[in-house]
Image (spheres, grey):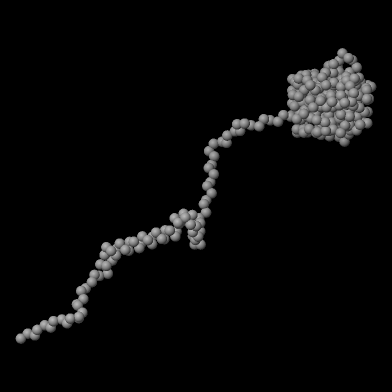
Amino acid sequence: MAAKKRPPKRGGRKPRTPGPSLLGRLTDPTVVAFLIAIAAALAVYLSFRGLPAERASSGKLARSATTPRPSRPTPAEPRATTAAPTNLHPTPARPTPSPLPGRPQPSPALPAPTPIRTANAPRVAIIIDDLGNDIDTVRRATDLRQRLTFAVIPHLRYSKEAAELLHARGFEIMLHLPMEPEDPHNDPGEGAVLERMEGAEIHAVVERDLAAVPWIRGVNNHMGSRLTADPRRMRFVLEALRGTPYYFVDSRTSAESVAFAVARELSVPTAQRAVFLDNVEEESAVRKQLEVLVARARADGVAVGIGHIKPLTVRVLAAWLPEAERRGVRFVYASEVVS
């Protein structure tokens, strides 16, 4: 007879039912959802830590010692592809200032001085008078290209234009100051110093004439045979130049002139004319006077000749100047012979 099975005891352990494997647990929907939530939270946290301080979502300044703030590169300037536009409103050119007593005027590049060929080379200063009425002869005179001095009468139609043109070519400019002549029928023109004038009026006239011609370096007299013989009036004239950069050349239109002596007395740098070049308007006569001028310069070391802005004089000088230079004559400006 078969033995009977014993019934299980109450309160005893139930037999173990095998649970799901590890793979099964990981694929459980609840676990998967939990892991995804953790991964998402971790990703958000890490991305939050990596943002620059000024972009933190909390709005607070975050400070990170490990992540330096990147420097922002300076943008390169765009390269110009077209030429720069011109100034649509250019500043107008400043007019040439009129010279005033006591104020030296600038000079352009001057022609090179004539080389000294011998130790006792004669120095010749040639002054061309009476500029202001004609401009065509002045233009022709610019081709002379020698150290010449031109004297401009003030207040004439071409006074300023002639001075500007010659100054730009490197010549020296003088004021050809009108003064009263002996012959009352000879009109010295506007701005003349007259014998009836006294000191204050003469000073005013001279200063007005000085301001009328640009770039002047000195003064000589236009006409003036009566006035230059008057010591009192010449003192007034030269007092207007005393203490300024201007010199005075006595044209000696009269043998009775005291202008040179009064200038010396007042310590105004001065010289006086030795030869008139073209009182006779013939080529041979002008050439003869030029040779007389050179002879005076050889005898005295220096001589001043005065001609006039005439076509004949300019034409003779154009041919004669190179010849005289080859013979050793040294041409200088009037400012180089005054003392």
The number of callouts visible is: 0
Residue furthest top in the image: 185
- Going by the image, does 50 lie left or right of 158? left
Q: Position of residue 22 (x, y in %)?
A: 27, 69
| Residue found 29% across the figure and 65% down from its top | 31
**Is residue 324 shown to the viewer in this render?**
no
Residue at 41% x, 60% y: name it. Answer: 45
The image quadrant of residue 240 is top right
From this viewpoint, is residue 153 visible?
yes
Above or below, comparing residue 211 to residue 39 in the picture: above
Camera-side residue of 8 and 27 = 8
In this view of the protein, which residue sits in the foreground, 251 or 105? 105
The location of residue 107, given as percent across then percent down, is 77, 33
Quarter of the picture containing the N terminus is bottom left
In front of the other: 298 or 62: 62
Q: Can you name the residue that lies furthest to the left here? A: 1
